[in-house]
Image (cartoon, rainbow, N blue to C red):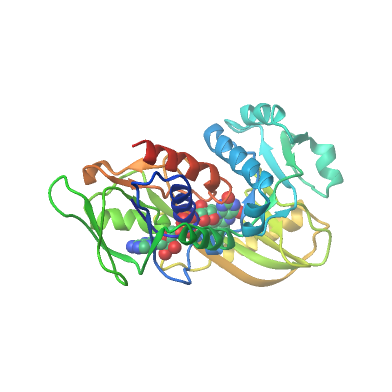
Amino acid sequence: MCVVGAGLAGAALAWRLAGARSADVEICLAVDSPDPRDASRASGGLVRAFEIDPWHRGNAERSLAELLSDPLLRKWAGYRRAGSTYILDTGRPGHRAALAAARAMSGVRVAGAADLAADGWRGLPEHAFAVCEPDAGYLSPHDLRTALITDFAARRGATLLGPVAGLERTRSGGPWRVRTVGDGPRECDVVVLATGAWTPALLRRHGWETAELTTKAIQYTQVRVAGRRPTPFVDETSGLYGRPDEDGVMLLGVPTESWGVDPDRLHAEPGLTDRAVRLAAERLPELLPGDRLRTVVAADCYGERAGLALEPVAAAGGGMFTFSAGSGGSAKTALAASAQAAHDLLRG
Ligand SMILES: Cc1cc2nc3c(=O)[nH]c(=O)nc-3n(C[C@H](O)[C@H](O)[C@H](O)COP(=O)(O)OP(=O)(O)OC[C@H]3O[C@@H](n4cnc5c(N)ncnc54)[C@H](O)[C@@H]3O)c2cc1C
């Protein structure tokens, strides 16, 4: 089996496969570059158990539970326990049901307007409720994937260097030949494209385009702040999200509307930073935002169903899958999603 792409998704999947493999399965991982500029490098790394979508929530809960119970994974990921405040707009479809589900989750507290005001929040609509998780926090997806690749190699998983330049059948119905720029060709029965935002174009190049996958830009800005910093948060009533960074700095962002972008040609939109800073000043008046230090923009692959899952590439005619649709949130689901994908692949 060959996993193509060594972002967090591909690294976690290859690591799972190498850890669980039966003696007759060889696993290789095609690594594009030793210093990739990808979503896993750019990611804010917020992890929590709560998500609005029930399927996504299940994966987020399982991933956080595994992380919290495994000191080695926490160390690899540089995990910081910082809490999480997820503010729902219960006037919107799905949010009321998600709030009811949150009340049944362990380690979770639901907060109303008065609690949020005590935490420094202002100007929230009456129907805003927050799902608070003290055990949630953030990690470094880049550090985690680097450690997973190292451990994968130590388990005698083979690493192929250089971007995959060719994928073709050796003969009709036969294995796939995977050609990388840096290594010789490999024959594989199963190929998994964990190529993130590069996946739609890669499928298109091979004539396997699927309407379900697209890309979207994600942007945040490091902003120096003089005042009280909140726990990592998502405010669904305004779109604002953020988390504390190094001392006196916050990451602040709002969603972009840049769909279908080329991940190699992205530009920061100053208007989004203006909006994020303005909203932060309104919603969190004690934050006192100042200088903007650096804006980060990167793309992720989005699928019809939010979140990473193994999907067959029907047009390729067997043995070809994607594991790519991080949908802007798979740092928090990659552990559980990769365990499920590895199980499904090895079960055949
Ligand atoms: C700015 C930003 C902030 C985010 N913040 C959060 C957050 O706070 N919490 C959260 O849960 N999620 C967050 N996410 C989402 C999460 O980080 C991503 O869903 C996740 O990192 C995607 O991992 P991936 O492996 O699918 O993609 P990527 O990390 O993009 O990896 C894909 C890899 O495939 C490689 N590749 C492409 N083509 C080829 C080829 N032909 N051959 C070989 N390799 C190839 C690329 O070089 C790359 O290394 C954020 C994403 C972004 C962009």
Asked whether residue 256 appears in the rendered view, the answer is no
Side (left or right) of 170 relative to 112: left
Residue at x-position 29% and y-position 44%: 313
Residue closest to the eye, 232 or 22: 22
Q: Residue at x 12, y 47 (%)?
A: 172
Q: Residue 316 location, x and y as percent? A: 23, 46
In-image side of 249 versus 181 (left or right): right
Residue 254 in the image, given as x and y percentages of width and height: 60, 55
**Residue in view at x 25 percent, y 64 percent:** 185
Total tally of numbered discs in the picture: 0
Quadrant occupied by the C terminus: top left
User: Which residue is the extreme one toward the left?
Assistant: 172
Query: Is 339 above or below relative to 224?
Result: above
Q: Residue at the location (54% across, 46% down)?
A: 335
Q: Is residue 334 visible?
A: yes
Residue extending farthest to the right is 118
Q: Could you say which quadrant of the image residue 57 lies in?
A: top right
Residue 140 occupies quadrant: bottom right
Most foreground residue, 254 or 271: 254
Q: Position of residue 206 (x, y in %)?
A: 23, 55
Estimate the x, y position of residue 238 in percent, counting from the top left: 65, 47
The foreground one among 224 and 48 is 48
**Residue 235 vertical placement versus 276 (above, below):** above
Place residue 109 in its image quadrant: top right
Above or below, 210 against 31 in this view is above
